[in-house]
Image (spheres, rainbow, N blue to C red):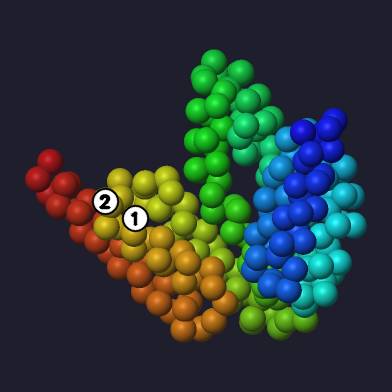
Amino acid sequence: VTLTGLGLKIANGLVMLGRGNLMLTLFFTMIASILLGMGLPTTAKYIILSIMAAPALVDLGVQPLAAHLFILYFGVIADLTPPVAVAAYAGAGISGGNSMKTGFIAVRLAVAGFMIPFLFALDPGLLFINSTIGHTLLLIVTALAGVLALGAAAGGYLLDHTKIHERVILMISALALLTPGLLTDSVGIVLLAGVIILQKMRISKKVKFA
């Protein structure tokens, strides 16, 4: 992928596809960074994408610091994504597990981490850029709650093993919390709190009948 230049060509094409639409550009920049992660070290990935993708993100209104941090973040997290999940494969080598399976499990467990760059790209207040302390604290709290909900939905465990309907609710909660806005944050908190209450009630019943 790297030696033939295919990764760079695909990455460039993906970034060009998203031009004019912020969410698409962010998404394709993420994919491009992961593709380049199949053979390039983090620094090289960052240099290439900072030239290729960062200007497009800045033109669409993303703060320069947030744009470059977005690229760097996915340059690092690319080490988790198969088929060339360097970090996951190293862990599999130590544990003696299946390397590919370990890579996919790593992605599932880290899925919440994939959302963080989108948060600070859409609202740089999370990086203390053009924001008040109160607004930044609110963003941090809702981001943590969203990551918790998404991690529980992907991992299948919160206070107890999650049922199918609880996973769906947690996923909706995560999407709401990770979408900037007071209304969406409120909906997300209510849904997350509802699942926590349900699981606490279920745990109490288990203890009572144990």
- For residue 201, which quarter of the picture? bottom left
Residue in view at x 65 percent, y 59 percent:
27
Name the residue: 87% across, 49% down: 48
> Looking at the image, is 16 positioned above or below residue 61?
above
Q: Residues within 10 Å of mark 2 (few under 14, many from 20)?
A: few
Residue 64, horizontal then vertical, whole percent: 84, 69
Whether residue 120 is visible here, answered yes or no, is no
Q: Name the one closer to the observer, 200 or 80.
A: 80
Query: Marks 2 and 1: CB-CB under 8 Å?
Result: yes
Q: Nearer the viewer, residue 41 or 149?
A: 41
x, y percentage for residue 129?
Answer: 78, 75
Instruction: From the image, tell me which residue sits under label 2.
Output: 163
Looking at numbered disc 2 in the image, what kind of residue is underneath it?
Lys
Q: Is residue 118 left or right of residue 178?
A: right
3D distance between C-alphas at marks 2 and 1: 6 Å
Q: Residue at x 64, y 82 (%)?
A: 134
Which is nearer the eye, 87 or 139? 87
Write the residue at 82% across / 74% down: 59
Q: Position of residue 185 (x, y in %)?
A: 48, 77
Per the image, label 2 sits on a secondary structure element best described as loop
Q: Is residue 18 left or right of residue 110?
A: right
The percent coordinates of residue 17 (x first, y second) are 71, 62
Q: Quarter-wise, where is residue 120 in the image?
A: bottom right
Element under label 1? helix
Residue named by callout 1: 167
